[in-house]
Image (cartoon, grey):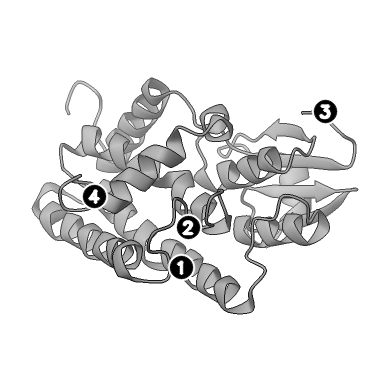
Amino acid sequence: MAPPSDDLKLLGSWASSYTHRVQLALKLKGLAFEYAEEDLADKSPSLLLHNPVYKKVPVLLHRGRPVLESVIILHYLDETWPDVPLVPADPYDRALARFWCHFVDDKLGPAVGAVFASPSEGQAAAVEQVHENLRLVERELREGAFAGRRFFGGDKIGVLDIVLGCGSYWLAVFEDVMEVKLVDPEAFPLFHSWLRDFEEQEEVKAIIPAIDRLLEYARGVRQMMLGLSPQQQ
């Protein structure tokens, strides 16, 4: 990748899967960019200036103009730099990808988050909600529009792979922290195989933080959510 460019600057957070989506898209497209790490507990004037509505990352600055929300940014990158396309060219395939991207953010992601936030008595129901959503993905991989594909985007990573994959590594982290099983290879063989393949791609390895760092972060957040000190947990 070329040296950082004045044209592209990404405001993000190292633990944010939404930030990772944009980082991965930029890497896949070979676009040089400057990265600025945000402290979400003490948001920078730049973040508040460029995203005054939601005040969150990621924010992509292109020639000083902000583009907000990770999926919108992915489409913007694809429309602005169409080489190495991430979004399908066929209108129907493009609509499918958009639908399932929405599914990830509207159903699967919140379900996974609910497992992490749930007290012990609500954990089984929260885990079942994740499994219900993963069964829908597994069915699409087995007999739906994505059947027989290596990635959702075909032979190469596409926009849905990015949206679903950037964040799926949290499943293993939450399994460890919460002592639950979210992705059983026997129950979800196609999803499990896809995720392993996705995580083995060099561009993906370059943006996923080390598992030990993710575990430490998740344990700290969990303790804070439960109002417990490390000694009490």
Instruction: Mark 2 and mark 1 in contact? Answer it, CB < 8 Å.
Output: yes
Tell whether label 3 touches label 4 (CB within 8 Å).
no
Whichever of callouts 2 and 4 sits on the residue coming sooner in the sequence is 2
Whether pointer 1 and pointer 3 mark residues with C-beta atoms closer than 8 Å, the reply is no
* Pointer 2 residue: 152
Task: Give me the residue at 57% from left, 28% from top.
Answer: 206
Question: Can residue 170 be seen in this snapshot?
Answer: yes
Between marks 4 and 3, how big is the CA–CA gap?
A: 38 Å
**In 3D space, how far apart are the residues under numbered discs 1 and 3 (Cα atoms)?**
33 Å
| Element assignment for label 1 | helix
Q: Nearer the viewer, residue 66 or 96?
A: 96
x then y, percent, for residue 100? 46, 68
What residue sits right under mark 3 in the picture? 2
196 sits to left or right of 33: left
Please rate how many residues cluster around mark 3, counting C-alpha atoms within 10 Å: few if below 14, some from 14 to 19, many from 20. Answer: few
**Label whose residue precedes the other's in the sequence (1 or 3):** 3
